[in-house]
Amino acid sequence: FAEYIKFRMEAFVTLATNDSYAIGALVWAHALRQLQTSKHICIMVTDAVSHELRSLLAEVADSVQPVQPVLVPASATSAATAALNLLGRPDLQGESLGLAKLRVWQLSQFAKVAYMDADTLPLVNIDELLDRDELSAAPDPGWPDWFNSGVMVLRPSEATFQLLMRRAADSPGSLVDGSDQGLLNTCLADRWKSADISRRLPFGYNCLSYAFYSYLPALRHFRDSVKVVHFAGAGQKPWQLSRRPLMDRTAEFRAEFLGEWWTVYDACVLPRLASAGHSPQASASVGSSGAEREQRLAWERGEADYRGRDGFDAVLDRLRQFVDGLD
């Protein structure tokens, strides 16, 4: 009974803001199931997620929680939009600015939550995350000294939610990066920086895909320490990327982690999408053909067809297509 009570009180939570991110949430939830989590799985959804995808989410999650957008004053929206333009993230623009994530603090049915973005993928059982306290998060690479809000351990609290809302309304500049991460760091930094050192999660709990290029030696040495991979950044989501082999020096690791995501997708998500009559093509390139998948797998096994589809002419043609697409 005590274990059941703990299950009800502690949860892994993610957010799906549309059908594309719902695909990410499905893979995330199925990965947690495969890794035999003992915690509650909750998926927050906005009105933009279709009924069909909500039904599929309900099959794998313990609960699906509808949430409303978080709206901020026009002054904050204007400042945030300018910041997002600098970052080249128009996908995060709009009156809600992607702040629906903050609704996680309103999930009062839980005593503690490990929030994870829908573009994260757990690679091992990470139930121990919920042994940490608020606010636990991994550092964001680079400057300033911020935490990355893609993986956070927190305690739901209406008071904290209202604190965030007041800060966004009273200090438009608190939306430094135009979205939730800037607001959270300007408002709650003391709960992370000044608290016990245990609040700083190891980087392995939030291994950012865009950091791979500068962390190759570390990744080779500490690969077994990577517990969660985070496909952060515009155009970096697995459902936005082609399954063709990656032709750069990050391929060793990016292909591995993308392959982990696609493995869960192919085994657990794709069959359910098909049985529900939902077109996988609605999610960019995740519905790649079987031939493309076999080509990728053969490449990763070191069985490249250098006289055919993987030969020089084919590679050159692919590069030309890429360059033409930049025009």
Image (cartoon, grey):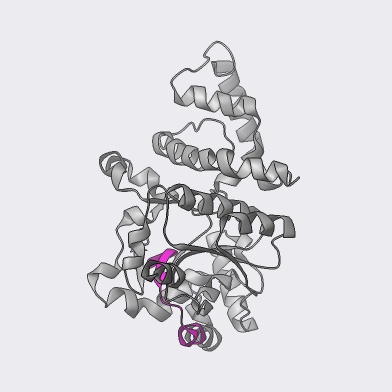
> Of residues 73 and 69, which is closer to you in this image?
69
Quarter-of-image position of residue 57:
bottom right
Residue lying at the far front in this picture: please name it: 1
Q: Quadrant of the C terminus?
A: top right
User: What residue is at 38 percent from the left and 67 percent from the top?
Assistant: 3
User: What residue is at 56 percent from the left and 39 percent from the top?
Assistant: 267
User: What residue is at 68 percent from the left and 45 percent from the top?
Assistant: 273
Against 207, residue 166 (above or below) is: below
Against 314, residue 235 (above or below) is: below
Q: Quadrant of the N terminus?
A: bottom left
User: What residue is at 40 percent from the left and 47 percent from the top?
Assistant: 123
As for residue 241 lying within the magenta part, the answer is no
Horizontally, residue 77 falls left or right of residue 195, namely right
Which span is picked out in magenta? 143-162
Q: Position of residue 144 (x, y in %)?
A: 36, 67
Residue lying at the far left in this picture: please name it: 197
Residue lying at the far right in this picture: please name it: 277
Q: Position of residue 81 (x, y in %)?
A: 60, 70
